[in-house]
Image (cartoon, rainbow, N blue to C red):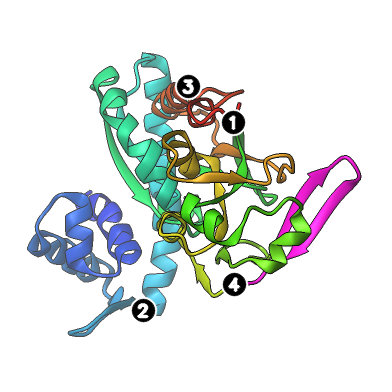
Amino acid sequence: MTEISAIPICVAVAEQGSFAAAARSLGITKSAVSKRIGGLEAHLGTKLFHRSTRNISLTEAGEIYLAHAVQALGAAREAEDAVAALQGEPVGHLKLSVPMSFGQLHVAPALPEFLRLHPGVTLELSMDDRVTDLVETGMDLALRAGTLPDSALIARRLAPIHSVLVAAPDYLRKSGMPRHPQELVQHDCLHYAYSRDPQEWRFLAEVGEITVRTRGRFRVNNSEALCTTLLAGLGIGRLPSFIAGSHLAAGRLTRVLPDFAMPAQALYAVFPERQYVPAKVRAFIDFFAARVGQTHPYWDVEAGLS
């Protein structure tokens, strides 16, 4: 039974890439992690991890053990979910993955209220713009924007995500306000690197879709960093309204080409398919959907975009 209780520790070491990081994620000491892994390896009669002074990696036996350990851990969580569903009240540890900028601006400020409402829940927030595998990383829930790929994940639409073109007032005084999307080729355009095609901007008009190939001297993979450069007057850029909204409302940014809408996307809550959806997952989805506003998100309302 001692070896069975080491399964979550083994999975944490494999996920985190070191004993120290696994210890921090589990809230125990590094020596305790090392001792439990050593005991598990002694019980199995083989090494699960290659160790060096710089890194740690799975052995062939470790790869095989990890695959079964992840399944066992998932089954244990399913059992906990089934019991929690009978109790009704959300309890347990909720692991939530969100995009970096959205998480910092709109998720993190909401968490104190959620935790006050549900004292039986503990929460671990992971902020990363990369799309990670929820099952492999042990995440209960993720918030994702855009078009979702086909997968076994369950998705619930939470709110629309609008993109807007913006620039600082100083830039527009210096370089002029474009009146048509084609005039953007005469401007310095700043680009978000994780877009499917950062330089191709699409607009919806009465005559149909207009596509413009923009150019500029700056590209970045973080929307808040992009916003910072726009505020500094470097050019015109495309931002999600959840970032641009407060700056538009305060007059720090000005909307460009407001008569030419850009294609909208959506914010989704996604979670692994399970026989029992944990009460903690349902509780967070319902809480956040109500907070955001499913038809007209509060950031759009504040900026007069909705």
User: In the image shown, does 53 or 46 lie closer to the viewer?
Assistant: 53
User: In the image shown, does 204 or 12 lie closer to the viewer?
Assistant: 204
Provide the secondary structure element on which disc 2 rests: loop
Q: Is residue 145 visible?
A: no
Q: Is residue 296 visible?
A: yes
Horizontal and vertical percent position of residue 87: 36, 15
- Mark 4: which amino acid? Gly
What residue lies at 58% left-to-right and 61% top-to-bottom?
175
- Mark 2: which amino acid? Thr
- Sequence order check, earlier mark of 4 and 2: 2
- Sequence order check, earlier mark of 3 and 1: 3
The Cα–Cα distance between marks 3 and 2, rounded to whole angstroms, is 42 Å
The Cα–Cα distance between marks 4 and 3, rounded to whole angstroms, is 41 Å
- Mark 3: which amino acid? Asp
Disc number placed over residue 59 in the picture, else none: 2
Query: Vertical placement of 280 versus 258: above or below?
Result: above
Q: In this rendering, which labeled residue sits more in front, label 4 or label 2?
A: 4
Within 10 Å of the Cα at label 2, are there few (<14), some (14-19), or many (20+) other Cα atoms?
some
Query: Vertical placement of 99 versus 87: above or below?
Result: below
Provide the secondary structure element on which disc 1 rests: loop
Reading the image, the residue beneath label 3 is 286
Quadrant for the C terminus in the image: top right
Reading the image, the residue beneath label 4 is 216
Q: Quadrant of residue 121?
A: top left
